[in-house]
Image (cartoon, grey):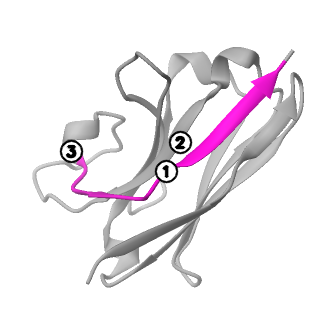
Amino acid sequence: QVQLVQSGGGSVESGGSLRLSCAVSGFTYSRYYMGWFRQAPGKEREGVASVYSDGRKIYADFVEGRFTISRDNAKNTLYLQMNSLKPEDTAMYYCAAGSSPYYTSPSIDPSRFGYWGQGTQVTVST
């Protein structure tokens, strides 16, 4: 059974940092591409960052060098280090996994991901 269990998140002041974790089980983690997404109230889910199985990464423009996605294949865990957080980063954050052979590069298109974590809230105050 595929499981993605998220941890981390919480409330911070503007300029602060948080690290999100996503522990996966039930599949060969190293073969999957992984991503982080977020959804603010009243808005559509949007891609934040993605890392392909070979380590290549892609970030949304709004990240502007503030976030770092990483994966530890030995621990079957995905991370998102978020620095210089802004109030507009407030959202529910989700990790996701995908394995389609049709996609050969990292992407932040949520339709390419078939498995999702439970979500974790990130709130950034002014």
Q: Which residues are magenta?
A: 113-125
Q: Is residue 120 magenta?
A: yes
Q: Is residue 30 left or right of residue 1?
A: right
Residue wearing tag 2: 93
Of pointers 1 and 3, the one earlier in the residue sequence: 3
Q: Main secondary structure of the magenta part?
A: strand
Marks 2 and 1, how far apart at CA: 5 Å
**Which class describes the residues within 10 Å of circle 2: few (<14), some (14-19), or many (20+)?**
many
Task: Judge whether residue 123 can be spotted in this image.
Answer: yes
Nearest-to-viewer mark from 2 and 3:
2
- Up-down: is 104 above or below 99? above
Q: Considering the numbered disc 3 on the image, is that residue within a helix, a strand or a loop?
A: helix
Q: Earlier in the sequence, mark 2 or mark 3?
A: 2
Nearest the eye: 32 or 56: 32
Identity, as a three-letter code, of the amino acid under mark 1: Gly
SS state under label 1: loop
Q: Which residue is mark 1?
A: 119
Residue lying farthest to the left in this orientation: 102
| Label 1 to label 3: alpha-carbon separation | 18 Å
- Identify the residue shown where x is 77% and y is 26%: 124
Q: Residue furthest front?
A: 41
Q: CA distance from mark 2 to mark 3?
A: 17 Å
Q: How far across and how far down the image is residue 43, in percent? A: 40, 17
Contact, mark 2 vs mark 1 (Cβ under 8 Å)? yes
Image spot of residue 10 (x, y percent) = 75, 45
Q: Residue at x 62, y 24 (%)?
A: 63
The amino acid type of the residue labelled 3 equals Arg
Q: Which residue is mark 3?
A: 112
Residue at 59 percent across and 82 percent down: it is 75
Circle 1 or circle 3, nearest the eye: 1
Residue 52 in the figure: left or right of residue 40: left
